[in-house]
Amino acid sequence: MSFLNPFLFISLIAVTIPIVIHLINLRRPQKLAYSTVFFFKELQKSTIRNLKLKRLLLLLLRVAAVTFLALALARPFITPKFTGFSAAGTPVLFGIVIDNGPSMGQIDGKGPYIEQARDVANILVNQARNTDRFLIYTTHGENRFNERLSPAQALMALDEIAVNNKGAHTRNRFRELITRMVDDAEYRTALYWITDARRTQVEALEGLETASQSLKERIPVLPVIIGEEPSPNVAITGVDIPAQIISYDKPVGVNVEVTNFGSVQAINQYVALESEGRQSGQYEISLGPGQSQSYYFESVAGKTGDFRGRAILEGDPVSFDNIRYFSVRVPERRKVLLVTEELTGSSSSYIKPVLDAAEQTGAHIISSNINLEAFASTEIDNYDAVILEGLAEIPEFMHGTLQRFVQDGKGLIVLPGTRTSVNSYNRFLNSFNAGRISGLRGDYGRFEEVARLDRLVEGHPVLDEIFDKKDDETISIELPSLYYYQKVEAAGGGGSQVLLRSTLNDPLLIESRYGGGRFLLFAMGADPGWSNFSINPLYAPLFYRSVLYAAGSEQAGMLKHTLGRSFDAIVPLGNIDVQIASEEQVFRPEAVRTPQGIRLQYAAVEWEPGLYSISDGETERLMAVNQDISESNFSTFSAVDFVNAIKEYVDVQNVIMSGRMTADELLSTIQAAGFGSEVWMWFIIAALICLIAETLITKMYKTEK
């Protein structure tokens, strides 16, 4: 505790007055003649003791009353841990973090949130002295003010702060600002955070705790919360290309997800898809509070290369998240590598003829064939899919290479051979969490049917559109007989999907996801000793579509980036001199050559939503850049919940709810937060209580009688 008028402590001399009065009253009681009865002697002793106690109690109350009055004259106040605007001579370094994300574009009765934030910051600056300095940081986009600013410079800087949709960097900005303020030992420090208390913004502080341990002792934070009730908002929260086989002559399916983040029903709004400059359909939406719904569109990619587009939401007044971009690569041809035990021993297999026929008929596949010995010297990253056919064992050196290959978004197809080592295959399958081989059915080459292929069920890209038919048309085809196949158990946990089964309910074709790629496992080989499948009309189109599906994962086809994060991606380019360009700017990322392609890294703090081109001078790729969907959620914390949420990361000193205050109230509250709270009134009250108690004791406790 400190005092604004400490020289008035001289008034404490008045404390001697009740002491002098007390000493004057220390006279012997008057003696009276009473009967010599022992009872009265004892009563006299008791009365004298009570009289002394009363006088001592009255003395203490009078001294306390005078002391409290003297202290009140000295204007005591509680010095805050938060330094703020103090009258002391040491200059103050003020840190101001201003939330300038899209949510600060909301408007309430006091105007736009961002203007209210600037008004609060102006109050802070106008209370400072010329020797004080300011560090002003924004949470979104590039931080333009990295140097200490004088009050005049700070006022000019605040005028330039505006809402932007360039991604949030809240945690990094706090960490950088804290580090700078801790290192400036010549200043006392005070840190203000001006925000709308959006939940997702507060949650973005996660991970700051290790950097904020010194902050908790040296740089307490005073949040100033802008606004009251958040605006309703409907947003496009996702654009995805569902699992499918993408080619330039087939429709591309696009799922668009729309979410109502508001607390009221969303009506009279529409979502549409625009691809290559053409609209591909429209839906009217009706979503309740907190609801999400996905809408499916189809559009035909008329050529190979980058198929681009955007989803558009119409009728929502909060516009920053009403457009979401996408770009997917439509390949000219997919390169497939077939690995067999021996090239000379592959004549009985029907895999190579299917691939050759597809290539000769102008389909979307280019195939190459190598034997197992050549695998170690082959650059498999140049291929979109690898097929392992009929290997007796899968060597350990292939495990890691193929794992990375699939994880990076490529495809792998495995067909067993007649001399397959179950233990070797199971070790390989276990490395992909792709199930296991548990046994065999039938005898190879005996041509005795043990089961048939069960009916085909559409609903997967491999099986969809395998027949050119009308919607209501029924396909009648003789399903192949099975003579010999492996009993395969699919992996648990929902990571695998059975595409084909036998009539005994055994899986014959299983898809497993691994990283960004796909792993297809067949339970039977491709030569006639396993089944008559290879001479069935169904075989060629089914295997061809399986290869296309494995070689065309959507992660490999879509190139996208979310704002608020550093850009880090491996792009299949040839040259290391790469540039990234938007409609107005060109950026030079850090580029490093890797076996998978060129790894590009860039801070991306100045990027905005849109389509960006990545070019090395020879090859160009399009990338879709969109805001983080958390920016669309305007829900906020109450003051109490806000403090509880951030106290793990920073030492929060109260909270100022500016949305409920007039300009004068806000000014006085900010000043009080820096100066501390005057408590002289409590000393006046304490003095009055002491005087009232002294009066009551004097009137009611008459031991003199």
Image (tube, rainbow, N blue to C red):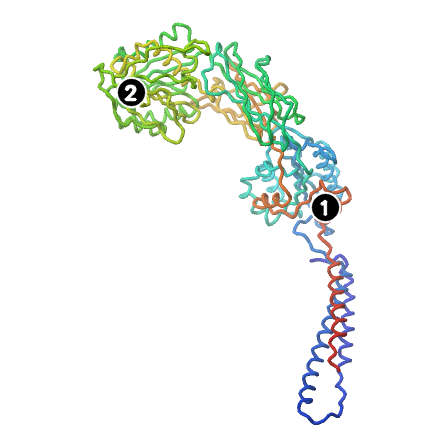
Q: Is residue 291 left or right of residue 189?
A: left
Residue at point 42%, 14% (across, down)? 334
CA–CA distance in space, label 1 to label 2: 75 Å
Q: Residue 605, percent across and down?
A: 60, 29
Q: How would you rate the neighbour count of disc 2 (Cα within 10 Å): few for under 14, some for 14-19, many for 20 or more?
A: many
Q: Nearer the viewer, residue 77 or 605?
A: 77
> Can residue 382 be seen in the rendering of this structure?
no
At mark 1, the secondary structure is helix
- What amino acid is labelled 2 in the image? Pro
Residue that sits furthest to the left in the current view: 446
Q: Quadrant of residue 584?
A: top right
State which quarter of the image contains the C terminus.
bottom right
Q: Residue at x 70, y 34 (%)?
A: 113
Q: Identify the element where label 2 is drawn.
A: strand
Give whichever of 283, 653 is nearer the camera.
283
Above or below, 399 relative to 59: above
Q: Is residue 440 above or below residue 20?
A: above
Q: Where on the picture, by quarter, is residue 182?
A: top right
User: In the rendered structure, which amino acid carries the disc numbered 1?
Assistant: Ile
Tell how many labels. 2
Disc number at residue 416? 2
Image quadrant occupied by the N terminus: bottom right
x and y percent of residue 383 in the render? 40, 17
Rendering quarter of residue 694:
bottom right
- Residue 318 is left or right of residue 380, and the answer is right
Residue under label 1, please give it.
670
In percent of width and height, residue 542 lies at 37, 13
Along the line of sight, the residue nearer the viewer: 426 or 20: 426
